[in-house]
Image (cartoon, rainbow, N blue to C red):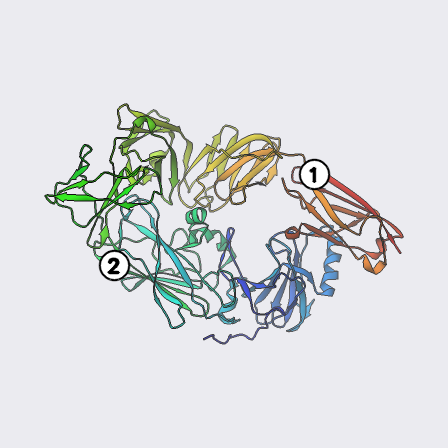
Amino acid sequence: MLEVPANNYLWPTNTDKTITTLFGEKRSRRFHAGIDVRTFGRIGDKIFAVESGYISRIKISSDGYGKAIYLKLDDGNTILYAHLDKFQDSMEILSKKYQIEQKNNFIDIYFNEYDYIVNKGDIVGYCGDTGSISGPHLHFEIRDSEGKPINPLTNYYAVSDTLKPIAESLAFIPLDKNCYINGRQNYEILNLTPLEVDNNKSIYKYFLEDTVSVIGKFGLALNTYDKINQSPFNFGIYEIQMLIDNKEVYKINFDEYSFSQDYLIYKEIDFDLLQSTSKNYHRLFINNNSMLDFISKQSNSGITIDKNFHNLIINVSDNYNNKIQVQAVIKGDILHSPIPFFDTNNLSLNFRFPPKNIDFNLMTRYENSRKILAEYSIFDSTTFKFTSFPGNYDVLEYSLSKDGIKSLPQYISLIKYDPLRISGEFILKHFDNNIMLTFYEDEYTGYEADLIIDYKNRKSNIIKMKRFNKNELCSGLLDLSSIDNIEQIHIKYKTNPEIIFTKPFRGEVFNYTEDNFLIFDNLSITANKNSIYNDTFFWIEDADIQIPKEFSIISYPISIMPNNIPFKESIQLSFDENLGAIFKYNKKNDKWIYSQDSKNINLITNINSGNIFAILSEVKPPIISNVFPNNGSKYDAKDINTISFNIKDAESGINKNSVKIYLNDHKLYYEYIPYRNLIRATINPLYTKDKNLLNISAEDNLGNIKKHSIIFYKK
């Protein structure tokens, strides 16, 4: 049942109470500070003063909030309405006046308390699609007297919501090099199974089917989201509480926060999992985000448990107290599989002691192979003889279970693999505090191998590789000091002949308490002491990414790594090059995005995580289309109060400050709506004649110019 709001605010628009985004949800490098009200693709819905007060600020920009109005209420709160199509009439006229006075298309104006008083229910503007947006809607915020965003659905508004949140999976995260999760040293993502449903057939309990074996310090992250009646969208949740053995160890509550905490978004949402799965996993532990107002200060910063069984409970609630619960059993113990002797001649395994609760499967040598049950006979309780294997199912997998936990699967090659066929690639993965080097085999080999790390001082370190998965030979979690001043790595197989793979590494460990500087060929990386959360290993790799034919290549693509660790503040990349511009590769859209912040002697960009970059050039000018008024047409004076046109540049993008519009040699100030590639400007009637010349010019971000002129007539 919905609670009655404590404050009698009006709903901000003349649309129904349909929401597309909730308070506290993830946005790029920030939390969503309000709610988004759905307008169903319409532009022009009325926006009302939710309570009496005065207009304290208006702002027009091409990005961010776009066209926005700030209403300071008599109760001390401030309301922000963003992405407006236009202000109410008098404020719209005033905004045009300020554009002319300041000689700027984009303005930010503050007002005094008695300048523009509004009453509850007054129209203050109209819904639109200005600013950084993917479709028309109203972004609505409530900020308290200190300017902190507060959740509008806590005490101010109620929407129809009887649906429970949904939980999909639970991730276990190793937080030190002694941590093993189900025998592995890596993220372990486990799918949740519905346990119980209520009378409305809504799931309200989920569980993990198997006990999780975990030793060392670990953290948890939950993939969960909410649903709201008659809405197709997935929403953020309101509250998560985690208990171990009925003791609260974590709690997050999306009520209010400070904008100064936006940089902590990727410490609350797991950035590694966001990059690899495109899903939001809420980290249920404090990790450099103890200052975040959402999180209870008594929350854990990592968990260690003893060898007993422990009950894990996670309670998830939405804004209207619809709840679910996640249940799991965890055990601070590990089960090791015994290593038997395998006789390739008669396909038999011999254990020293009789194994109990053992499972055998057959697989192919390729990753993600499906499993089939292995057929075998048992002799003397320690010897297992297998029948012939079908086709290319020549890899035997076995694991044990005991005291509710399973061992890490072990693998045996049923035939000798030709070592000359061995192939694969090195991958270095960065964790919060550790790194791991992995060699991914194209085909399972069955051979053991050593990792050899060569350092710039000519010293070396040899590490026995562990097979955590069938096709992965891993170093295990290493301290960052293990790869500081690294020069190259080798994997040496224990085969005859000896097989060795080598990869050079260009990188260095940055200390988070110091300023750091690193040079690679024509590239320099600069980080100050506030740039990173923890000590971080930075390295560079060549990137084999196709460059579209529209571009000329000045400098080939490179990967700045790590790309799964968020930075606290921006890190500067500087290229010793003065041609072209820096572009960043967007893997999701398979597109190169202009990403340059400044250009002097060098090309400079500021980055918030690793990515792929290249220096490119292109000569195609922007495209100007759909110009109104039409060339050669005649209009009544009342029909030509606005000039509009579409402008687009698919390669480097439009330089928003480069657009110039002149009507009969009079400069016009405009609004730029990127979502529709639209420029529009209001015509001053004093500028028009019987015959009118309209001149338009614009540049892309590489300085390619497009000019367009038309003549139109007044009837």
Q: Position of residue 514 (x, y in %)?
A: 43, 40
Please identify the residue farthest to the top as the structure is shown: 497
Q: In what quadrant of the picture does the N terminus appear?
A: bottom left
Q: Amino acid at mark 1?
A: Pro
Placement of the C terminus among the 4 image quadrants: bottom right
Residue annotated with mark 1:
621
Query: From the viewer's perspective, is 703 left or right of 220?
Result: right
Query: Tag 2: residue type?
Result: His
Q: Position of residue 41 (x, y in %)?
A: 62, 60
Q: Is residue 576 among what the camera can see? A: no
Q: Position of residue 335 (x, y in %)?
A: 21, 48
Decide which of 100, 701 is in the foreground and name it. 701
Residue in the picture at 27% in, 32% down = 447
Please identify, in this view, whether the residue under mark 2 or under mark 1 is nearer the observer.
1
Image coordinates of residue 558 in percent, x first then y, are 50, 33
Pointer 2 residue: 310
x 53%, y 36%: residue: 613
Q: Secondary structure at mark 2?
A: strand
Label 2 neighbourhood size at 10 Å, few (<14), some (14-19), many (20+)? some
For residue 503, say whether it is visible: yes
Which dot marks residue 296? none
Image side of residue 607 versus residue 165, left or right: right
Separation of residues labelled 2 and 1 (CA atoms): 64 Å
Pointer 2 or 1: first along the chain: 2
In the rendered image, the vertical position of residue 413 relative to residue 332, given as above or below: above
Quarter of image, res 539: top left
* Residue most extreme to the left: 380
